[in-house]
Every structure is written in C-alpha cells, then in structure tokens.
Image (spheres, helix red, strand yellow):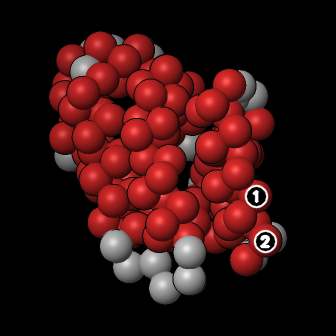
Amino acid sequence: MTTLKELIVSANFDAAVNDMASFITTTVEKQSGLTGMALKGALAAATKVDADIVAKGSRRLLPEMADSLDGLWQEYSTSGGSDFGVFLAANEQRAMDAILNVADRNAETITVPGLGKVYKGVRGKASKVIIEELPAIGALIEKNTH
C-alpha cells in the first residue's frame, strides 16, 4: 500500500506546502485570548528571524508529519472512510501525538537563538489548537494526496 508520505511528496508537494503554510498562518491569526497572544507572539518572533519560516518549516516538516501520521492514514484507507479529518478527530490523542512528536523532535534541533525557548513556551497551547483543528488538518492532507 502507498504510504502517506509517498502521496504527499509527489507532484502535489508544492501545493501541499503552500496549503500547510497558509493553514498555519490563518490558524494562528484566528486565535484569541492568552493562547492567541502566545501563538501570535511566537509566530512574530519566528518571522522576524526569517519571513519565509512558515513555508520553509512546512516544506521540511510535512514529509515527517506524513510519516508520523501514516499508521492512521493506513487505518483510514482500509476502513473505507470518506473524511480523513473526521477520522483524525475520532483518534485525537494518537493524531495529536503523531503531529507533536514531529514538532518536538525538530524543536530539539533549532539552532536559531531564542526560537527553541519560544517553542517550549507555546507547546502546550499548540496542542489544544491542534486538537481543535484536526478535521481541517485531515482535510488538507487528504486534499493533497490526489
């Protein structure tokens, strides 16, 4: 069976990267309260270092995220489901762990002064947002597998 990574890293990869970068930016921008302030501050700090950091990060992490979500993708594919986002939401802990494991692994290798500390400061808040956005994350991934 074809892996999720093979499906994502195909002719549609650039579109998937653009979709993910737009999704991240839009998702952060719509947050409010303390979570919104923390995430918006983190994004602002990161984009001060590199204006294209969201797109570059999406390009680098999307294949890893696809690898990490592959077990869920294979279950979804064999289940006859019709909406990967709904499937991720129904398996929210596993999906969130798969996504955050990739982020955590990569945060350990951040070489830009201060960005690792910023990530650690928003990680807990990000997990809440990821759970809320699992249907949209799944839809974005599924859209870019065709």
**Judging from the image, what secondary structure is the residue with disc 1 in?**
helix
Residue 8: image x %, image y %?
Answer: 47, 53
How crowded pointer 1 is (Cα within 10 Å; few <14, some 14-19, many 20+) is rated as few
- Residue, x 33% and y 59% (percent of image)? 104
Is 6 left or right of 11, judged from the image as shown?
left
Specify the amino acid type for callout 1.
Ala
Contact flag, marks 2 and 1 (Cβ < 8 Å): yes
| Residue 2 or residue 53, whichever sits in front | 53
Q: Residue at x 46, y 78 (%)?
A: 110
* Front-most of residues 7 and 90: 90
Tell which of 89 and 33 is nearer to you: 33
Q: How many marks?
A: 2
Q: Amino acid at mark 2?
A: Lys
- Expressed as whole percent of the image width and height from the top left, the position of residue 121 reads 48, 52
Q: Image point 69% across, 39% down: which residue?
A: 37
Where, by quadrant of the figure, is residue 23 drawn? top right
- In the picture of the structure, the residue carrying the numbered disc 1 is 44
Q: CA distance from mark 2 to mark 1?
A: 6 Å
Is residue 136 visible in the rendered image? The answer is yes
Other residues around mark 2 within 10 Å, as few (<14) / some (14–19) / many (≥20): few
Q: Which mark is drawn over residue 48? A: 2
Q: Position of residue 77 (x, y in %)?
A: 27, 28
Image height check: is 11 above or below 138?
below
* Residue 55 in sight: no
94, above or below 43, in the image:
above
User: Residue sitting at 30 percent across and 23 percent down?
Assistant: 92
